[in-house]
Image (spheres, rainbow, N blue to C red):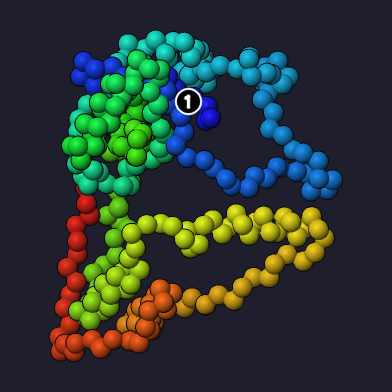
């Protein structure tokens, strides 16, 4: 059972749903220790008090705001919990919007919201089914870890999921990253759409959606433990610095995608067009 990250309630108009917040994801990355290379002894990060010239325990550590170089204002966890904000003790729902109106770049980590006891079962189920029928997501505000946050509530199977949302000022301006307009032919765009169709699927199941990096690191560690040579690097197609023939690359990509799906790999005949057309620049979707 995952540990509870936060306990409080969902504030939905006059409805209050007691909930427990647990992580919706797991990290299976392989972890490494910092070691001294000469003797492989562990290198640890110490929590050290500069004034008393000694290492301190977790129980001696608190929060402090640096007012000046020499003046620090202490702030306790209890004081933060008692802030006069409705979001300090509740996830306050402030709006409902269609899911497609949320730019995915704003969506952060996810958490399951678990009904806290039998008394919460009915209002929890009410909110979940109402969200499901409306085909909307809820926009919420909540305060965790010393700051007020924006969030998104949606339904996943029988559970309500909370996703952190980034504030507007946390999204970097992308105008400087946009490339200059280039000339594309209709044939190139058609071929790119065909490649998209060839790679379209209904789920994310299959061997191509596995963490190959972690598997490779595990194989490396096992080989070193057994005193044998690590697995050899496979031959990869070299990337050229410049695209010489975009159309040929697209056609080859479509053929490979068809082969991977067990389809005929024959290249189709594209209609011939005399004129090139400038691709219209699409405006980025905004939330």
- Name the foreground residue: 169 vs 71: 169
x then y, percent, for residue 113 = 38, 28
Q: Is residue 167 left or right of residue 114?
A: left
Q: Which residue is found at the position 57% from the left and 45% from the top?
A: 28
Q: Which residue is found at the position 15% from the left and 89% from the top?
A: 274
Q: Across the whole image, how many numbered discs are drawn on residues?
A: 1
Q: Is residue 238 left or right of residue 279?
A: right
Could you tell me which secondary element the residue under label 1 belongs to? Answer: strand
Q: Which residue is found at the position 33% from the left and 72% from the top?
A: 198
x then y, percent, for residue 169 = 30, 38
- Name the foreground residue: 53 vs 281: 281
Quarter holding the C terminus is top left
x then y, percent, for residue 279 = 19, 71
* Location of residue 244 (image quadrant): bottom left
Q: Is residue 1 above or below residue 37?
A: above
Q: Is residue 278 above or below residue 84?
A: below
Pointer 1: what residue? 5
Is residue 46 something that shows in the picture? yes
Q: Is residue 72 left or right of residue 120?
A: right
**Disc 1: CA contacts within 10 A as few (<14), some (14-19) or many (>=20):** few
* Location of residue 11 (image quadrant): top left
Is residue 87 something that shows in the picture? no
- Name the foreground residue: 267 vs 274: 267
Q: Which residue is found at the position 42% from the left and 23% from the top?
A: 20
* Location of residue 253 (image quadrant): bottom left
x then y, percent, for residue 243 = 39, 79
């Amino acid at each position: 059972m995952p540990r509870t990250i936060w306990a409080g309630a969902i504030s939905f108009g006059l409805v209050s749903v007691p909930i427990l917040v647990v992580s919706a994801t797991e990290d299976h990355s392989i972890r490494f220790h910092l070691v001294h290379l000469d003797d492989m002894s562990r290198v640890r990060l110490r929590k050290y008090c500069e004034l008393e010239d000694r290492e301190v325990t977790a129980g001696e550590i608190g929060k402090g705001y640096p007012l000046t170089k020499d003046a620090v204002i202490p702030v306790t966890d209890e004081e933060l919990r008692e802030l006069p904000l409705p979001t300090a003790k509740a996830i306050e729902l402030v709006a409902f919007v269609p899911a497609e109106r949320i730019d995915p770049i704003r969506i952060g980590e996810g958490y399951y919201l678990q009904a806290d006891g039998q008394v919460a079962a009915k209002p929890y189920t009410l909110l979940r089914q109402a969200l499901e029928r409306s085909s909307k997501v809820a926009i919420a505000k909540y305060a965790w870890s010393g700051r007020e946050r924006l969030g998104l509530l949606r339904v996943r199977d029988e559970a309500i999921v909370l996703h952190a949302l980034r504030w507007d000022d946390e999204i970097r301006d992308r105008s400087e990253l946009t490339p200059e307009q280039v000339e594309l032919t209709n044939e190139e765009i058609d071929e790119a759409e065909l490649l998209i169709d060839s790679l379209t699927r209904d789920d994310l199941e299959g061997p191509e959606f596995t963490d190959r990096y972690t598997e490779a690191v595990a194989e490396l560690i096992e080989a070193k433990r057994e005193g044998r040579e690590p697995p050899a690097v496979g031959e990869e197609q070299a990337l050229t610095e410049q695209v010489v023939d975009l159309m040929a690359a697209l056609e080859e990509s479509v053929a490979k995608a068809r082969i991977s799906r067990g389809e005929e790999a024959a290249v189709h005949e594209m209609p011939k067009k005399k004129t090139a057309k400038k691709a219209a620049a699409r405006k980025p979707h905004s939330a």
